Image (cartoon, grey):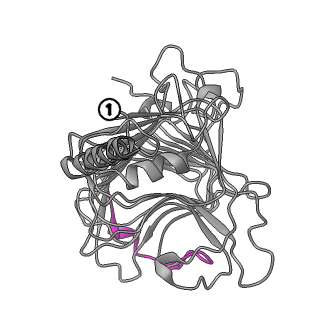
């Protein structure tokens, strides 16, 4: 019995020592809640299980679980989360906020579809679908919501992140049940005012204000927010450059299609004057641009089209309104900009077509190259 006890004690010491070594050295453990050794985490909403390793042959099921593993990991290096096609219902905010895992410009956190739009095997039905179903009781920045209902979908609170190839819906609620209420979901959010380098690319944001309102597709604070090759179809607002510790530097919007919006295409509340807006098409919607209420900064629009919008520019505003009329001279229209108030974009609505929800070839705006595909 004494011999067996000594063996058991030695085994316990060995396993405790091994665990401590892995935590201290930052090695990737092949255990539950760890990041696989190659840095890749695979998700499949149908065949996956959150008890799996997260490898290609043993995918996990939920994006929430992927975030938990990344948040609790120790070390550095790139991590890629691959989403197989299917529906990912978010019943709680998916927060990416790793404390002890460090990314860099070249070794990023990437959250992406397994098959991307430029792949020959891709079609619109293969896009992973994100839909938020959580209660609308979130408190932005910890404050009570004055409009009686908000939720965040994917919240990114770390530097050097790419989100790519996802089909992102809103939330199935009644947006305005009473005066003073604006019930809303923000599918992709970053609150950190001093964070840097968030790229959202090749994503399709779809909404329907009567069934699945997509209140504001991208709400991002901080610096280096780049939105490119995305399609925003019937959302309320497309992109808001929210708050930052100083005017947000190195932000861009390019090769995006914003169509049918009943809010505004872009809000540059925090963007610095180096903001780049080029090769975008905005049409068949409400407002083109919303400035910060102080109107201090001017912005340049390059090689873009604004077709059939009701109003070009306002300032201030928020969830309940779009602010006041603003000085149109705060927008500088460079060469290649076309503005047509009495025209409409022709959008492909045949779901079997590869260019579904894009501008029909040969029609107004199609030459700009706005949409999901990287056209060389």
Q: Say what secondary structure mark 1 lies in.
A: loop
Say whether residue 185 is left or right of residue 250: right
Q: Of residues 340 and 270, which is closer to you in this image?
A: 270
The x and y percentages for residue 190 are 41, 63
> Where 297 sits versus 357, above or below?
below
Q: Quadrant of residue 343?
A: top right
Q: Look at 53% across and 39% down and name the residue there.
A: 166
User: Is residue 175 within the magenta segment?
Assistant: no
Quarter of the image containing the C terminus? top left
The furthest residue to the front: 1
- Highlighted range, magenta: 318-332
Q: Is residue 370 visible?
A: yes
Q: Position of residue 109 (x, y in %)?
A: 34, 44
Position above or below: 248 against 282: below
**In terms of depth relative to the viewer, which is nearer, 7 or 113?**
7
Residue drawn 28% across and 63% down?
A: 195
Q: Which residue is mark 1?
A: 37
Residue 321 falls inside the magenta stretch: yes
Q: Quadrant of the N terminus?
A: top left
Residue 161 at x, y = what percent? 34, 48
């Amino acid at each position: 019995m004494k011999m067996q006890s000594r063996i058991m004690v030695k085994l316990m010491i060995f396993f405790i020592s091994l665990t401590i070594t892995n935590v201290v050295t930052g090695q990737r453990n092949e255990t539950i809640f760890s990041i696989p050794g190659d840095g890749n985490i695979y998700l499949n909403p149908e065949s996956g299980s959150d008890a799996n390793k997260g490898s290609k042959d043993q995918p996990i099921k939920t994006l929430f679980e992927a975030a938990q593993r990344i948040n609790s990991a120790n070390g550095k290096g790139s991590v890629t989360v691959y989403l197989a096609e299917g529906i990912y219902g978010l019943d709680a905010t998916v927060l990416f906020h790793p404390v002890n895992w460090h990314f860099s410009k070249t070794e990023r956190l990437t959250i992406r579809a397994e098959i991307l739009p430029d792949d020959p095997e891709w079609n619109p039905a293969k896009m992973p679908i994100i839909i938020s179903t959580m209660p609308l009781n979130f408190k932005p920045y910890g404050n009570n919501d004055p409009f009686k209902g908000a939720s965040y979908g994917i919240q990114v609170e770390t530097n050097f992140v790419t989100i790519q190839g996802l089909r992102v819906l809103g939330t199935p609620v009644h947006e305005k049940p009473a005066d003073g209420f604006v019930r809303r979901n923000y599918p992709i959010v970053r609150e950190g005012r001093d964070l840097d380098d968030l790229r959202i690319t090749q994503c399709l944001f779809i909404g329907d204000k009567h069934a699945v309102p997509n209140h504001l597709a991208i709400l991002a604070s901080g610096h280096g927010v780049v939105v490119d090759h995305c399609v925003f179809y019937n959302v309320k607002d497309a992109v808001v450059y929210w708050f930052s510790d100083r005017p947000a530097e190195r932000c861009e919007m390019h090769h995006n299609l914003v169509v049918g919006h009943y809010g505004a295409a872009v809000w540059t509340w925090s963007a610095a004057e180096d903001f780049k807006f080029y090769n975008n098409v905005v049409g068949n919607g409400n407002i083109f641009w919303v400035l910060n209420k102080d109107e201090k900064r001017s912005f340049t629009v390059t090689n873009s089209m604004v077709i059939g919008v009701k109003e070009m520019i306002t300032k201030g505003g928020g969830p309940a309104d779009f602010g006041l009329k603003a000085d149109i001279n705060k927008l500088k229209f460079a060469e290649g900009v076309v503005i047509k108030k009495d025209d409409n974009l022709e959008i492909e609505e045949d779901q079997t077509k590869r260019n579904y929800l894009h501008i029909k070839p040969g029609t107004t705006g199609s030459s700009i190259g706005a949409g999901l595909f990287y056209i060389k």
